[in-house]
Image (cartoon, rainbow, N blue to C red):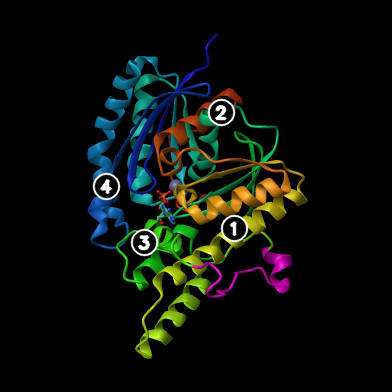
Amino acid sequence: MSAPLVLGIESSCDETGVALVRGNELLADEVASSVDEHARFGGIIPEIASRAHLEAMVPTIERALASAGASLGDIDAVAVTAGPGLVGPLTVGAAAAKALALALGRPLYGVNHVVGHAAVDQLVHGEFPERFMALVVSGGHSSLLLVDDIATAVDELGSTLDDAAGEAFDKVGRLLGLPYPGGPHIDRLAREGDPTAIRFPRGLTAAKDQAAHMYDFSFSGLKTAVARWVEARTDNGEDIPVADVSASFAAAVADVLTAKTIAACQRHDIDTLVIGGGFSANSQLREMAAARCAEAGISLRIPPIRFCTDNGAMIAALGSAVVRAGVEPSQLDIPVDSSMP
Ligand code: KG4
Ligand code: ZN
């Protein structure tokens, strides 16, 4: 018997994603984004995102079905992001998923968005090993997950106490006068700069932080350090060496992310690391992770970037794993949870 056909719906931020997955096979993956509508505000406006989801949701579902050559009646289960994310946007996706589950008489599975960022790798690089580590980094999250079973046993070892990695890049981008989102611009500039030019602080790596925050991250102190460094030079009328600042800042972020992740792999005897989330596009992180994983004998899996930014495939992939694990479906009155652990 073939695996169940799972429809996945993602709407936690500004992307409306709908995908169809059977087993680990991706049959359709459609995304509509409202990112352009937010650019002039320099950040996501939840109400604009919610309205955009409301308009895009049904057409995106229809496109996904058409692209898989499937009809509504073929769907065996519906998975939806229940959190974390923005409440309004999450609610639009949850309402659509509940309506489909109710009308089709199929089970509904509310799943975790951050875990979805790791789960999607299974569609690309095949079945996961028995245990692995996942680093999920984006504009909204920076989490280190120890995964015993992607459907049932995910332990968050640490997360950011303040800004997410991408968010820190966007804030530093703003103070350097770069367009929103600043992350990719800093990445590009950093490639022309000297990462050792300025020694910026590595948050939560001091000995005193090891007990309580060994695997947590903090990027707001780093962002403030960059701001102070830039302000001091601006006040003196000096030119800002933007490439060197970018490279030194990017190196500090990549250093902390990779050092803590690899330490966690070694401590838990893990030999596979999955990196997901939109920030995994970052060149400095990729290079440092590749080098340090090779050195530590850890095999590194990073899905292609279209699966790292928010999408429906990640939710369908996790839904598919959850269904196959025999997990009880969610009730049709499940809430959305903006800060889901
Ligand atoms: O996962 P994603 O598409 O959506 C959010 O969860 O926000 O991640 C987007 C984030 C933004 O903060 C963006 O600036 C950052 O990831 N980003 C990058 C790069 N590409 C995207 N940051 C640094 N270097 C990049 N190449
Ligand atoms: Zn995300």
Does the Cβ of the disc 3 residue fall within 8 Å of ligand 1?
yes
Front label number (1 vs 2): 1
Q: Please identify the residue farthest to the bottom as the structure is shown.
A: 236
Estimate the x, y position of residue 116 in percent, counting from the top left: 51, 39
Element class at badge 4: loop
Q: Main secondary structure of the magenta part?
A: loop
Which numbered disc covers residue 257?
1
> Badge 2 is on which residue?
321
Q: Earlier in the sequence, mark 3 or mark 2?
A: 3
Asked if the residue at tag 2 contacts the one at tag 1, i.e. Cβ–Cβ closer than 8 Å, the answer is no
Which image quarter: residue 106? top left
Answer with mark 4 or mark 2, whichever residue precedes in sequence.
4
Look at the image and give the residue range highlighted in magenta.
194-213
Q: Residue 149: which disc?
A: none
Q: Residue at x 51, y 29 (%)?
A: 123
Task: Give the residue at mark 4.
Answer: 34
> What is the spatial separation of the Cα atoms under label 4 and label 2, in whole angstroms?
29 Å
Residue 182: image tag: 3
Q: Nearer the viewer, mark 1 or mark 4?
A: 1
Is residue 96 found left or right of 51 in the rendered image? Answer: right
